[in-house]
Amino acid sequence: MIIRIILLLVMFCCMGMPVAAATDYPKKPITAYIPLGVGDTADVFVRVITPHMEKFLGQPIILVNKPGSGGAVALATLANARGDGYTMSWANLPTLSIQPQMRKLTYDPRKLVYIATPMQYEYILYVSAKSPYKTLKDLVEAARKAPGKIRYGTPGLGTTNHLGVAWLANKEGVQMTAVPFDGNPKAISAVVGNHCEAVNTSVTASVSPYQAGLIRPLAVFSDFRVPMLPDVPTLQELGYDFSQYSCLGAIFPPGTPEPVRQRMEDAIKYAIEQPDVQQRCAETLFAKIVFRNGTDYRALCEEYWTVWGDVLGQVGLKK
């Protein structure tokens, strides 16, 4: 009887260890991967909110850029980390909802721990300011006359940037060539340098080159016009039954305790509520803050698994 009581006590103590350990989390610096390169939307936004997250958590967050495979390199690395709350990754939606449907990956998005998503991307199709193409129709007609000649830069095959243009080309029955780069800034530079004819990129990544007069917007791929480009029409306004969507979120490795996940979710929410973050996102980054907790974030990724899965099927990229 005594032995049985001792065993029960040991069992209850062990069951309580992860929760107890999580209540004083974090005790040391946290490493956070950024899935795209320096200067990309994810990189810029994360570096804006991280100081406030550090203040909330009371520990430094070490940011490590891990671009490659449209963001999948970061999550592949994360999946092998310990689920103790000291390694996390920011994630773009394609790594969770699109790329697993295109090819075999070394991680399973269903086993990852979803922390929260604080913002969403809006997309614009640009050409060089020196380009002869003044409208989206001009670009499509050029692709129709010379199949494959129109090249468009992407931050990786299987990203929403890539698939938005792939959908357009498929809808119009034309051939356009996708050219992958390690991030939006390099894809934009390729357009400016006339190495590509077009690029479908986020508002935040395109602010500086647009304001410098280096690129010309043809159409907004999101479902509403963006404040930075009030006169540029959306695809839907141009007669297409399509809009493009993506978001940036935070992920922990499998097995991370719920109290740890909740603590990090709270840190992200605290950061985006700060007045300086709100002001900078609205006035200089043109980034749209839309917060979703871990449960809603996972549900969103599952919803867009179906949405983008349909697109993959239409353009012939679904495995």
Image (cartoon, rainbow, N blue to C red):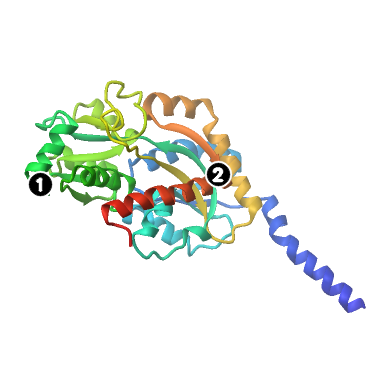
Horizontally, residue 23 falls left or right of residue 41, namely right
Q: Residues within 10 Å of mark 2 (few under 14, many from 20)?
A: some
Kindly identify the amino acid type of the residue bearing the numbered disc 2: Asp
**Mark 2–mark 1 distance (CA, rounded to whole Å):** 41 Å
Can you give x and y, in whole percent of width and height, for residue 51 in the image? 50, 38
First reached walking from the N terminus: tag 2 or tag 1: 1
Res 255 → quadrant: bottom right
Specify the quadrant that holds the C terminus: bottom left
Residue visible at 54% across and 63% down? 82
Res 66 → quadrant: bottom left
The one of 57 and 105 positioned closer to us in this rendering: 105
The one of 53 and 76 positioned closer to us in this rendering: 76
* Residue with the mark numbered 2: 296
* Residue with the mark numbered 1: 149
Mark number displayed over residue 88: none
Q: Residues within 10 Å of mark 1 (few under 14, many from 20)?
A: some
Kindly identify the amino acid type of the residue bearing the numbered disc 1: Lys
Q: Are marks 2 and 1 in contact (CB under 8 Å)?
A: no
In the rendered view, tell whether residue 226 sits above or below residue 30.
above
Specify the quadrant that holds the N terminus: bottom right
Can you give x and y, in whole percent of width and height, for residue 4 in the image? 87, 76
In the rendered view, tell whether residue 263 sits above or below residue 76.
above
Is residue 182 visible in the rendered image? The answer is yes
The one of 89 and 118 positioned closer to us in this rendering: 118
Residue visible at 22% across and 40% down? 199
In the rendered view, tell whether residue 289 sits above or below residue 19.
above
Element under label 2?
helix
Is residue 92 visible in the rendered image? The answer is no
Element under label 1?
loop
